[in-house]
Amino acid sequence: MRILITNDDGINAPGLVVLEEIAQAIAGADGEVWTVAPAFEQSGVGHCISYTHPMMIARMGPRRYAAEGSPADCVLAGIYDVLQGARPDLVLSGVNRGNNAAENALYSGTVGGAMEAALQGVPAIALSQFLGPETEDLADPFEAARAHGTEMVRKLLERGRWDGGEYRLFYNVNFPPIAAAKVRGHKVATQGWRTDTFFGVEPHVSPSGRKFLWITGGPQHLPTAPGTDVAVNLEGYISITPMRADLTAHDVLKDLEARLK
């Protein structure tokens, strides 16, 4: 198996080391793991691509490259430049430092990398490690992802649905913010919504008198509705959310058509 991996935390991120271990275990001794990751952190860039300017790509080692672009850029670079069109059998994106559940999934470069792979017709999984008070005391905050990641990816490959539609399925996996031994299993969950968590801005004035704005987030440990991703993560389960890039609100189509007649 040929696996392409990327992330949004950057080529030197510790979560990428965890993902490399997972990918090597899945690929096997005869497989190939190729890394194309951002040269610098790209958290929060979503599914953006560097459409208006070129990006530099550099070989960092055998099957290991850094690109000055987003995770989606890295997937494109991996497929069409690094692999010279020899398409991967699987794209893994992560392991992100922090959760990409609920509304975070919409901003996530980790999810954006998996989404781009799906749009390219390649099976893809995004993986993220929820962090919290319990993980702060661990020697390895990625312990849950490291211990359970390979099994989770293998289960999805063997038993998951992998359609070939126009907007094909990909998967968003979040590991709970607890020690590996406390993980209670996994649950398929819808994307949740944190009712009191929103991004905003906080203004600051520099010593030179110029105004700058910092993007601010909200609490990450507010549970979402029962059965949704954050809720099951906070209950100690790995969440698995099937996703598509199709943004159509299909549940509204017939009603809207009737209203506009």
Image: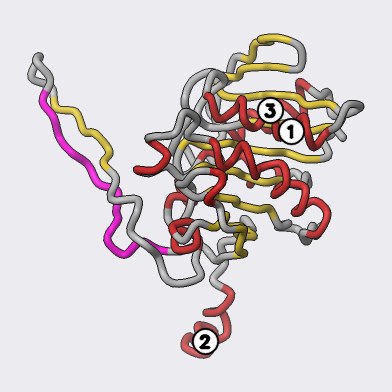
Q: Secondary structure at mark 2?
A: helix
Residue at left offset 63%, top offset 31%? 6
Quick check: marks 3 and 1 in contact, CB under 8 Å?
Answer: yes
Residue at left offset 21%, top offset 33%? 213
Chain part drawn in magenta: 193-205
Query: Residue 143 versus residue 28: which sits nearer the camera?
Result: 143
2 or 1: mark nearer the eye = 1
Apparent side of residue 82 relative to residue 223 in the rendered image (left or right): right
Apparent side of residue 79 relative to residue 188 in the rendered image (left or right): right
Choose the circle earlier in sequence order: 2 or 1: 1
Residue under label 2, please give it: 255
Crowding at mark 1 (Cα within 10 Å: few <14, some 14-19, many 20+): many
Query: Residue 210 versus residue 191: which sits nearer the camera?
Result: 191
Q: Does the magenta segment cover residue 255? A: no
Kindly report the distance in space between the C-alpha atoms of the residues bearing marks 3 and 1: 5 Å
Residue at left offset 52%, top offset 51%? 182
Residue at the extreme right: 30
Kindly report the distance in space between the C-alpha atoms of the residues bearing marks 2 and 3: 47 Å
Crowding at mark 3 (Cα within 10 Å: few <14, some 14-19, many 20+): many
Q: Quadrant of residue 2?
A: top right
Query: Residue 135 versus residue 99: which sits nearer the camera?
Result: 135
Residue under label 1, please give it: 23
Crowding at mark 2 (Cα within 10 Å: few <14, some 14-19, many 20+): few
Quick check: 186 above or below 113? below
Which circle marks residue 20 in the picture?
A: 3
Q: Quadrant of residue 204?
A: top left
